[in-house]
Image (tube, rainbow, N blue to C red):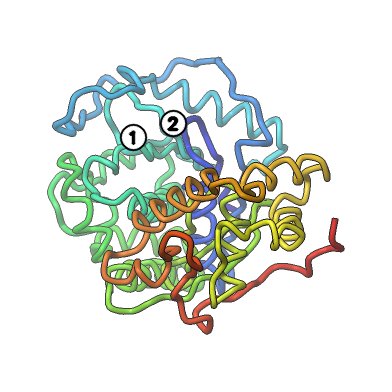
């Protein structure tokens, strides 16, 4: 069975790629469930709407004021977009489609499905209200993707779905969570109540359900590993959706949200355990050009040179741009890693001296294809 995940409006590349890597890790050994991913780069957003009835549905109160997204969209706005993308990309009619969106809906739902329960949207913007770190938002989003994939299989209509959700915490994947702050209870437990389990068994064979069961258990393991701030994880340099990123496999493949030239700059320091003086960056220009051309393999030669030369100071000049890039990288790292291990990953160094990354290099792996010839 195919589950197609669409990157909708206001969903960052960072969140979408992290969700993709996390779900691919969760379903790596799946025998019957297959996820495919459609990034935003490949489609134009559409303005069409269609009528959708929501008068009888419960409204969630998040206890926060309306944010910059606005008062919210009708459900039909989301399902019209999904319908358009199904046609545009010739998605198999039997596939279930889930669109991630940062757009609010008028009922403040964290997600909902269409009448026939074959398409669903998930609001990814609500989680920042209950999770301290933006990095940790990826886990409830991925849990909701798995939960909605199951719901789209379990029920033949959204009416039947609504009649079977739990309006009190069970805990179960089908808890409604009108108090969204209670969501971590069901996502960390990963439980499915006996009533919902029987409905799943009516629609899925044992192998199919085992795929979901194993995936939920893996997600719980990733969350526990992420919460274990005494263990330094392994940093991997990987390529996904034509983007080169630093990723942590033990946490489900979530990745550092660095700009491409920041990836190249940080990679240079990982390649030099003894450190690099910012004032001496010009001595590493050829190497940095090779790294940046690999990170941005669709850039022209001139574009790569321009990007690198903005960082490298001329001889005798203060490395202002390099210092700024270093600060931005360290800020991202500090937001990403727990406080007691971030020191292993930040770029350190005294003014005028070598700058280095303390990380034990056995904790760093390059998983890219071979870099091309020097520019």
In the rendering, at what x and y percent does residue 91 appear?
Answer: 67, 41
In the rendering, at what x and y percent does residue 87 appear?
Answer: 68, 31
Q: Residue at x 85, y 55 (%)?
A: 375
Q: Which corner quadrant of the image does residue 271 belong to? A: bottom right
Q: Residue furthest front?
A: 316
Q: Nearer the viewer, residue 343 or 276?
A: 276
In the rendering, at what x and y percent does residue 373 appear?
Answer: 87, 63
**Local crowd size for mark 1, using a 10 Å CA cut-off: few (<14), some (14–19), many (≥20):** some
Q: Residue at x 37, y 69 (%)?
A: 222
Label ID, residue 134:
none
Which is more N-terminal, label 2 or label 1?
A: 2
Q: Is residue 82 above or below residue 344?
A: above
- Label pair 1/2, CB-CB below 8 angstroms: yes
In the rendering, at what x and y percent does residue 92 appear?
Answer: 67, 44
User: Label 1: which residue?
Assistant: 159
Question: Is residue 26 something one can see in this rendering?
Answer: no
User: Label 2: which residue?
Assistant: 115
Q: Residue at x 41, y 48 (%)?
A: 148
Q: In which quadrant of the rendered image does the N terminus lie? A: bottom right
């Amino acid at each position: 069975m195919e589950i197609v995940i669409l990157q909708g409006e206001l969903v960052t590349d960072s969140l979408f790629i992290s969700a993709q890597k996390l779900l691919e890790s969760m379903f790596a050994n799946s025998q019957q469930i297959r996820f495919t991913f459609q990034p935003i780069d490949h489609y134009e957003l559409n303005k069409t709407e269609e009528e959708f009835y929501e008068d009888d549905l419960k409204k969630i109160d998040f206890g926060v004021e309306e944010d910059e997204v606005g008062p919210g969209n009708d459900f039909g706005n989301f399902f019209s977009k999904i319908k358009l993308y199904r046609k545009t990309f010739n998605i198999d009619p039997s596939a279930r489609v889930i669109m991630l969106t940062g757009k609010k809906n008028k009922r403040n739902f964290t997600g909902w499905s269409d009448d026939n329960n074959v398409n669903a949207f998930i609001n990814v913007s609500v989680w920042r209200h209950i999770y301290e770190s933006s990095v940790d938002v990826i886990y409830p989003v991925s849990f909701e993707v798995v939960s909605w994939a199951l719901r789209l299989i379990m029920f033949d209509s959204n009416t039947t779905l609504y009649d079977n959700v739990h309006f009190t915490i069970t805990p179960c994947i089908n808890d409604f969570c009108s108090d969204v702050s209670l969501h971590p209870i069901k996502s960390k437990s990963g439980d499915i109540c006996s009533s919902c389990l029987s409905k799943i068994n009516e629609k899925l064979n044992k192998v199919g359900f085992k795929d979901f069961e194993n995936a939920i258990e893996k997600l719980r393991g990733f969350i526990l590993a992420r919460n274990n701030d005494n263990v330094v994880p392994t940093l991997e340099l990987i390529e996904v959706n034509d983007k080169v990123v630093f990723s942590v496999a033990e946490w489900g493949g979530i990745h550092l949200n660095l700009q491409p030239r920041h990836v190249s700059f940080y990679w240079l320091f990982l390649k030099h355990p003894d450190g690099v003086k910012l004032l001496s960056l010009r001595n590493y220009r050829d190497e940095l050009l090779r790294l940046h051309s690999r990170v941005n393999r669709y850039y022209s030669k001139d574009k790569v040179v321009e990007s690198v030369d903005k960082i490298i100071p001329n001889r005798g000049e203060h490395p202002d741009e390099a210092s700024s890039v270093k600060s931005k990288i360290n800020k991202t790292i500090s937001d990403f890693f727990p406080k007691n291990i971030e020191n292993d990953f930040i770029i350190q160094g005294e003014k005028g001296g070598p700058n280095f990354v303390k990380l034990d290099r056995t904790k760093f792996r390059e998983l890219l294809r071979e870099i091309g010839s020097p520019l």
